[in-house]
Image: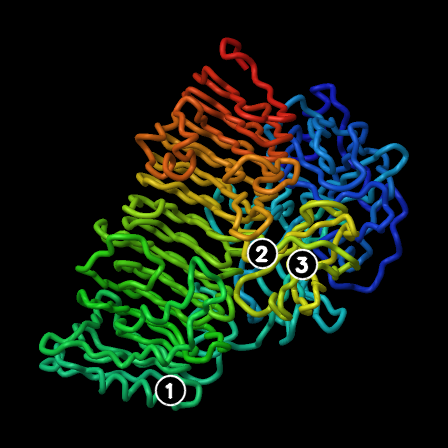
Amino acid sequence: MPDIDVKRRTLLQATGATVAVATLGGRAFAAPPRQAPQNLRAVDPVNPADAPVAISYVTEAVDDGSSMVIVGDGFTAQSEVWLLKLAKDSLDDAKASFGGQATLPDSPPSGAVKATLVSAAREQVLVAGQVGYPNPAADVAVFPTAVWVKTGEHWSRPYVMNKPAIFFAETDVLVPGETIRLFGRNFLATYGVTGANYDYPIALREADGDTVHWAQLYDGEGQARPNYKPHVAQIRIPADIPDGEYELSVHTRYGLENGWSNSVPVRVRAARTLVNRLARHDLTDQPGTASGSVRVDVVSIPDDARYNDNSRRIQDRLDAVGRRRGGGIVRLPAGPIAIGTTLRVPDGVVLEGSGRGATRLTTPLGSAFAGTFAVSDLFPSPSFVTGFTGDYTPYWAPHQPLVWLEGSSGLSDLSIQAGSRDFTAVLIGNSDPEKIQEDVFVKRVDLTIRATRYALRSAFTPTNAGIHVVSPTARLVISDCVIDAHEPLAMYAGRHAHRHAMIVRNSLSSHQRQDSNIGMIMGWSDSVFEDNELYSGGRGLICQMNTSRVYFGGNRIHEIGGRGNASEVLMAESGYALEEVTVSGAAATTVTTSSTLPAGAARATSSELYAWIAEGRGFGQLRRIADNDGQGTLTLEQPWRTVPDATTKIDIITHPAVNNLWVNNVYSNGRGFMQPFYGSGFENIITGNEIRSAGGLSIWSGFTVQGKARRSTGAYNLIYTNMLTGSDAINLYGGNTAGQEDVPGGMFANTVRRNQVWSRGSACQTNQYYNIWFSRPAEADPNLEASINLRRCDSTVVEANYVFQDDNGVLARGGKNNLVRFNRMDRVPNRILRQEDTRDLIATAPPFEEPY
């Protein structure tokens, strides 16, 4: 593999540009003495309260020659931005740097370069770029880079952008020797996807000590998928690591102490229980086997009883195995098996068929199904979030599951078919609102629940479903299933979120006459929705209440478009400002405010709460609220980089979409948009998705809630390398009404880069949703729609995109301080349109007649 640094230097020198190669690698200035290992924070050191110039945030994934948005304090039109790409380290040096003091000099050392200041029109915001190239380079790799801002004689503290960042690990319970994946950003700093250049350190530090164990970066995926490795790292846990609690961090071999990622907590256990082991979605790599032989009880079904009620003989065996220490497997024979009442699978037990095409559970032919499930057996449904959930218990009254999974239990290798009554194929739930069901799974199961009474309107109520989950879960696995139901998958939130769910390789569908969601998930995080097929039905996967740190990857979605709502797919919905508060005092990890949140609100529900600095000192920072005392003091999960003061106003935002990844999904022949989030969303990455003959790709924010002063906010999201063919547009929508552009709400500092829009489809022909919801009747005008639309956006970068054959290329409608440049457009007469108030829009494009 060629040395990328040599290649980059050659390209830079060929253009006559200053060589932007750092001399910093712990060598250009005196490095501090090594310190004992410490818990690595996800943010840089706190800026002192009296710092005249301070950086709060820098947008990431910046290629050479492209632009970044810098947010902070003390900026003017005369400010300077300096960048230093951190030098490459050897593997041994990178490991030796773990736990050291992350320090950079107060001002840029030799080798740093001055970036072009593109805009300083908005207070507390700088847009900078154009380092080394006159336009964005073909090189799309990103490297850890230090940023300084100078105003007058004052320098900001350096800010390191493009470091590796771990959003989450796919499971929080590990066993020695197994392989797991990490999800995040900047895991691939070079072109090399294999070999020595791709090898980098992964540290597992004991949470209650200084001992460090080293995991191995594991390249076992085979085909190299585009857009994958920058965001997914596969690692192998050391075979000799002892039981304990650990903090996991990675380093991509750039910048020594300054190049370490944040840490995420994991637990290591020497062995798994039987259900925990079978729940793992990948059985090819299963160390940590539980001791003892697996007990399998086989149920015998006489041939002449196949279509009678066999519930009692199966339930007796399930109960007997449930009383056995360590549990076990109850196996059903091949062929049809009728059950007249609900099968209740207890804790520690797996109900297994002889193959999903072999064993077939159904209802009796000679008698009606009389389920044993009672609504009173479940805890009361949450009503703490209105508008989307409320109390759904009354809707359960007529529903009866065929199989009920309680506790840590599983279902595999069979088919379930039911008639047209109010059936649920599989129910996962328990009666304790505080109990989290761990390691429950449904694998290799076919479910067919066909309704004959179709819903004629959209409703957020339980309907005939394949799988209903009504309790919070940890490490839920639904894999390799085929589900055809009115609503194939419905997961509801309780007092806790669903954590570390793995929903992979399933085929989920609904009848075309039914106006339903293919999936509805209320409140989940640190989870994976991957390689699924979704087709037919009213909407695709809709996630409400809380969606944070979820990987949506490689899913195939087609033929979506129901009569009601808006036919969206892969949408995280909701997220808004609960209240706007003022600040009376602050420290590194706390802030005293005028908040009226009741004590413990940040821990009371499955919805995460965040503090977003909307005005004043420290503007632009987002921190998750770990706790609150009911007297206005908020405790943060991570320290501020810039501590707020009395000028600061904070929005307390509930359940925004944060640190989610939409990667390499394909959506075709559908009516609605791929809508990654609708409401508030921060630091989401939307990359490599393909939309073919369908709606477009859009993110929406800036909505108000009745009685609330602030709009929802969508900030720091990256829309990157997506392709739309014969479909609608890329849309960023920053609010229902005009005004308030001087206070960033709605869309702020998002990046739209390297996307392609080919022969955009007509809004009227392609997508009813577009005209009803996005344009709104008072604003709809086909002549004022473009391939990329900015509606009331703020400090947005639209750069290096390609548009082919459309009347209009980029439309900026309202908003402030947006940057549109270096976009190529062929067969596009009107390349850039400006409507309404487009203050401080920086837009460049050659006229239509001139080639690029």
Whether 392 is drawn above or below 6: the answer is below
- Along the line of sight, which residue is nearer the eye, 507 or 422? 422
Q: Earlier in the sequence, mark 1 or mark 2?
A: 1
Q: Which residue is mark 2?
A: 578
Residue at 65 percent across and 72 percent down: it is: 245
**Foreground tag (2 vs 3):** 2
Mark pair 1, 2: CA separation = 45 Å
Front residue of this view, candidates 61 and 640? 640
- Residue type of the residue flagged with mark 3: Ser
Vertical order, 25 against 325 (above or below): above
Marking on residue 249: 3
Q: Earlier in the sequence, mark 3 or mark 1?
A: 3
Amino acid of disc 2:
Leu
The residue drawn where x is 56% and y is 27% is 800
- Image coordinates of residue 760 in percent, x first then y, are 39, 27
| Residue 142 visible (yes or no) | yes
Place residue 35 in its image quadrant: bottom right
Specify few, some or many for label 3: CA neighbours under 10 Å numbering under 14, 14-19, or 20 or more: many
Q: Residues within 10 Å of mark 1 (few under 14, many from 20)?
A: many
Residue 705 horizontal side relative to residue 514, left or right: right
The percent position of residue 552, horizontal first and vertical second, equals 46, 51
SS under mark 2: strand
- Side of 332 relative to 574 (left or right): left
Residue 762 vs residue 417: left or right?
right
Quick check: 38 above or below 122? below
Select label 3 or label 1 by which is in front.
1
Q: Position of residue 676 (x, y in %)?
A: 47, 46
- Local SS, label 1: helix
Q: Amino acid at mark 1?
A: Gly
Sequence-first disc among 2 and 3: 3
Q: Which residue is mark 1?
A: 322
